[in-house]
Amino acid sequence: MQKYSIFSLVKNALTGHQNWDLAWKDPNPKEEYDVVIIGGGGHGLATAYYLAKEHQITKVAIIEKGWIGGGNVGRNTTIIRSNYMHDENGLFSEFGMDLWRKMSQDLNYNVMFSPRGIINLAHSDAQMNAYARRGNSMRLNGIDAVLLSREEVKEIIPMADFSDNVRFPIFGGLMQPSAGTARHDAVAWGYARQADSMGVDIIQNCEVTGFDVSAGKIKGIRTSRGNIKAKKVGLCVAGSTNILAEKLNMTLPIETHLLQACVSEPVKPVLDKVVTFGAGHFYISQSDKGEMVMGGDLDGYNSYAQRGNLPTLQHVLTEGIAMMPFLSKLKMLRTWGGIMDMSMDGSPIIDKTHIDGLYLNCGWCYGGFKATPASGWTFAHTIAQDRVHELNAGYSLNRFSTGHIIDEKGLGTKTWIS
Amino acid sequence: MLHIKCPHCGIRSQNEFSYGGDATVKRPELNKEVTDQEWDNFVYNRVSPRGKHLELWQHLSGCRQWIKVERDTATHEIFKTYKANEEVA
């Protein structure tokens, strides 16, 4: 594989950029693989990369219905954080933060990781108390957390509404300084390029139509490009999890819902943090191009549409304007939607299944992008060793029936309850 | 914007309604032994199909009645609506 560096850039500039290698190949599916990963999104690509790198398993195929990076890894709002209270989520995400910090060097691909910090705003004394508790839990798990007063928040984001007659006055906030953003497409492309260079077959435009299971063991998959035998199969398909589960006669604690995001026209630098509104569900950051990147609530009913509905967008942006009134002056540039695998407790599932050799990675709700490296790393471990790692032991499939749910914010599929 | 035909009030916009999830889920009968798996299925596990989905909505800012709506989860087409106690054909 061609290494990317200032020297390779100069060398290729001199030859008119005609001699760059393809970043990854476009192979036809082979007859058999050791591991087949279904889903060529961030998590699937990362899983294949860590299978090759950490476990030396390279007879691997990634099967993608569309094109890699065309699903949620290309549709999210690029936020990376580990500001969780519960141990399962905090330790898992903080492990991921370490991988994020090293990712550009590790992948030899600039993912533009920008640890600019995230602030969750508080709008009542009770919320400040809850944030103090969450901040303390984070610090006990080695995650940086700073409780900010109203004045300190005003210092950092003076453009927020600090006037007296607002419905939800800002009391303060909880900041994780090491949180931030990254270039989402680069994450997919970086993992794809490295996985490909270690021998992983990335097979695009290939839809999975069925599974071959006999005597409780996975034997292979059926696809639109023929049957493929596999010793192990990992599902990494986010919003399409229920569609594949149905083909396996499995019913999962997952519902598929639509989440929208949008960007404004680009403006000069105004906001150098990720900020979340504490009295509703709205968050905002500014991209390197200057666009204000915003997101919020689910559309609120089961959906596979991959496109949004205006009432939710209006609701979300009303919250945004309540928090930062200057947003009302901006023009909207783009809106889009992605389909989320909403788990019933708001936390993900990375586990084995009742079928031998079939592994499940789903339930990422609002937080799939930031989990990409940790999810890939732990899922690769779970597949290669045929047992869960301690980092994803809490993300078990049976935690719902045994009562060990990880109820971080009380946010599952039923957002109207919160 | 979805337009939902409330069987009591007629066609109204989505803003008047609140969503209540899969309408085919059945609470286990309590006059017999209920297994953990049955509770699990009732409380957590959902089919969440792509295509026709029978679901509950409440006409919250209208007659406040719960209704059943048969809707396509990919196209958002609404095929038919029913009163909560009506048999679904």
Image (cartoon, coloured by chain):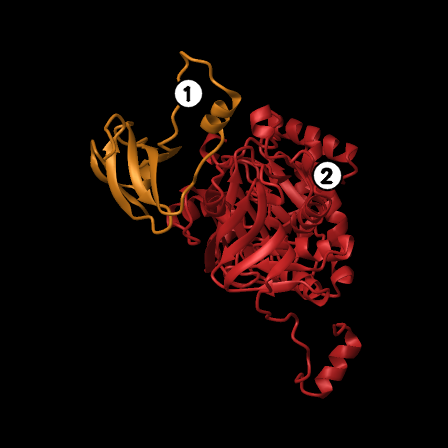
Chain colours: A red, B orange
Query: Which residue shows up at 45% across the image and 35% down it?
Result: B46
Label 1 sits on residue: B28
- Cα–Cα gap, marks 1 and 2: 35 Å
Say which element carries label 2: helix
Of A103 and A79, the residue lying toward us: A103
Q: A108 above or below A243?
A: below
Label 2 sits on residue: A391
Label 1 vs label 2, nearer the camera:
1
- Give the class, few, some or many, for how many residues have Cα within 10 Å of label 1's Cα (few <14, many ≥20): some
Marks 1 and 2 close (CB-CB < 8 Å)? no
Residue A302 visible to the viewer: yes
**B63 left or right of A118 in image:** left
Residue A182 rendering spot, x and y as whole percentages = 66, 57
Q: B44 above or below A112?
A: above
Residue A336 rendering spot, x and y as whole percentages = 46, 56
The image quadrant that residue B79 belongs to is: top left
At label 1, the amino acid type is Pro
Callout 1: residue from which chain?
Answer: B
Q: B75 above or below A61?
A: above
Say which element carries label 1: loop
